Amino acid sequence: MSDKESNWRFAEEFITESDEIVHARQHSIELGVDAVSPAVGAQIAVIVAATGATRIIEIGTGVGVSGLWLFSGAPGATLTSIDIEVEHQQEARRAFSEAGIPLNRVRLISGRALDVLPRMNERSYDVVLVDADPGKVIEYVEHGLRLVRAGGTVLVTHALWRGRVADPTKRDETTVGYRTLLKEIAGSDAVISSISPVGDGLLQLTKRGD
């Protein structure tokens, strides 16, 4: 095992997840849902805490793993979470209830994100988490940057896409999509950006003031 692999494993194993997140993660595995890794979840929690987030949108509910991490960093926030899988959202609602999160702080919307997002008010959210269909990641990020306020942050999971983004010989559609996004972001003056290598990669985009 290389030093980089050892560091990656250490960063993941360093995190202690709550019982509620452990339970939700187990459900995620059983249903075949790819949840954020412990280190990505912890980093998300730090970012929403540092942002002082009170209004969050999540694109891709899963069964609630990422949502629980968001609430761990911003326990007073209101979360709007969009997913096309109703069964998964029912599991997420159960996970939130077991964690003692008030129902009035969670709004679960079942449907295609690209149908729902245009109806959301622009510049009205502190954080947007993109953890959904990787084939539409560029469109999701465009919506996310429209929805966050100045100083708000868009977080994109799987930004290194199975380790393929860094390998120029990998040219499948999904990998090229992530590379295109990163290239566009690198040349933009509208955001401050960073990529963390934890998990499958976490892209962080903070919107500059107008």
Image (spheres, rainbow, N blue to C red):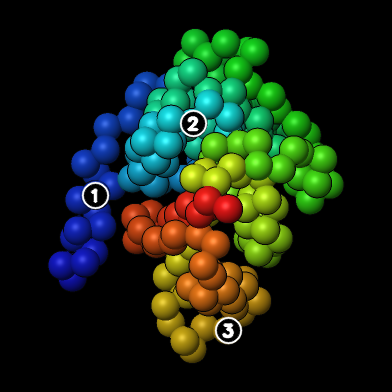
Few, some or many residues within 10 Å of mark 3 (<14, 14–19, 20+): few
Per the model, the C-alpha gap separating discs 1 and 3 is: 29 Å
Residue depicted at 28% across the width and 47% down the height: 12
Residue depicted at 49% across the width and 10% down the height: 100
Report helix, strand or loop for mark 2: loop
For marks 2 and 1, give the one nearer the viewer: 2
* In-image side of 6 versus 142 (left or right): left
- Mark 1 and mark 3 in contact? Answer it, CB < 8 Å: no
Residue 54, relative to residue 124: is it above or below?
above
- Mark number displayed over residue 171: 3
- Amino acid of disc 2: Ala
Q: Residue placed farthest to the bottom in the image?
A: 169
Picture coordinates of residue 193, whole percent (x, y): 44, 61
Residue 141, relative to residue 166: is it above or below?
above
Per the model, the C-alpha gap separating discs 2 and 3 is: 37 Å
Instruction: Write down the residue under mark 2.
Output: 53
- In terms of sequence position, does the residue under pointer 2 or pointer 1 come before the other? 1
Report helix, strand or loop for mark 3: loop
> Between residues 99 and 71, which one lies in front from this camera angle?
71
Picture coordinates of residue 175, whole percent (x, y): 56, 74
Residue depicted at 43% across the width and 82% down the height: 167
